[in-house]
Image (spheres, helix red, strand yellow):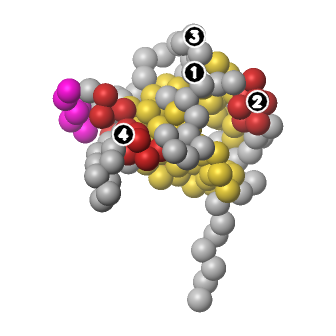
Amino acid sequence: MTSVNGTSAIEEASTSDFQVELSDEAFEALASLKGSAVVGVSFWDSSLADELTEQVPAAEWRSIVDMDLRLDNGILLELYGVLLYPSIGDDPLQGIDRIEETLIGLVDNEGVLVEVAETQEGGLALVFGPETVTEVVLAVGAWVVSEWQDLEEE
């Protein structure tokens, strides 16, 4: 993915608040969001991670996506290189249709962030579900935390 100014999306993202390592500070900041409900989601049928592979997977084989999660407290989680797992220990979801269905269910079922964890590789894992029941686990390659606001009606 190349932007209009000729730089790659990864190069542009590296100049923002793009995080790829789960430091103690980042873990604490994300853990403070536990209990926040997902009120909106957007995802792309491609990923920044595609730049790291020689062949981009077809939609029915895709397992890595980039997404934005809007939380009820005004926080926007921009998540890159995300694998979605139906539960801890399962294989990641595969196929855009299945990923979309899961993300829609997360919003429709009023999913909340129930746990922030570290993957075996030292990366970020976010566990969402209704209360204490796991609905989906997101293994995140990189992320940005910011704020979002509703667009004012004119």
Left/right of residue 55 with respect to residue 42 in the rendered view: left
The residue mark sitting in front, 3 or 2, is 2
For marks 3 and 2, give the CA distance.
19 Å
Q: CA distance from mark 4 to mark 1?
A: 17 Å
Image quadrant assignment for residue 18: top right
Q: Amino acid at mark 2?
A: Glu
Dot 1 surroundings within 10 Å: few (below 14), some, or many (20 or more)?
some
Which residue is the site of mark 3? 120
Q: Of callouts 1 and 2, which one flags the residue occurring earlier in the amino acid sequence?
A: 2
Q: Which residue is mark 2?
A: 25
Q: With 39 as the anchor, is 30 left or right in this view?
A: right
- Which amino acid, mark 4? Ser
Q: Is residue 76 above or below residue 79?
A: below
What residue type is disc 1 on? Gly
Q: Which residues are magenta?
A: 54-60
Q: Secondary structure at mark 3?
A: loop
The answer to whether residue 131 shows anywhere in this view is: no
Q: Nearer the viewer, residue 135 or 79?
A: 79
The percent position of residue 127, horizontal first and vertical second, equals 64, 29
Mark drawn on residue 47: 4
Q: Residue 53 at x, y = what percent?
A: 26, 27
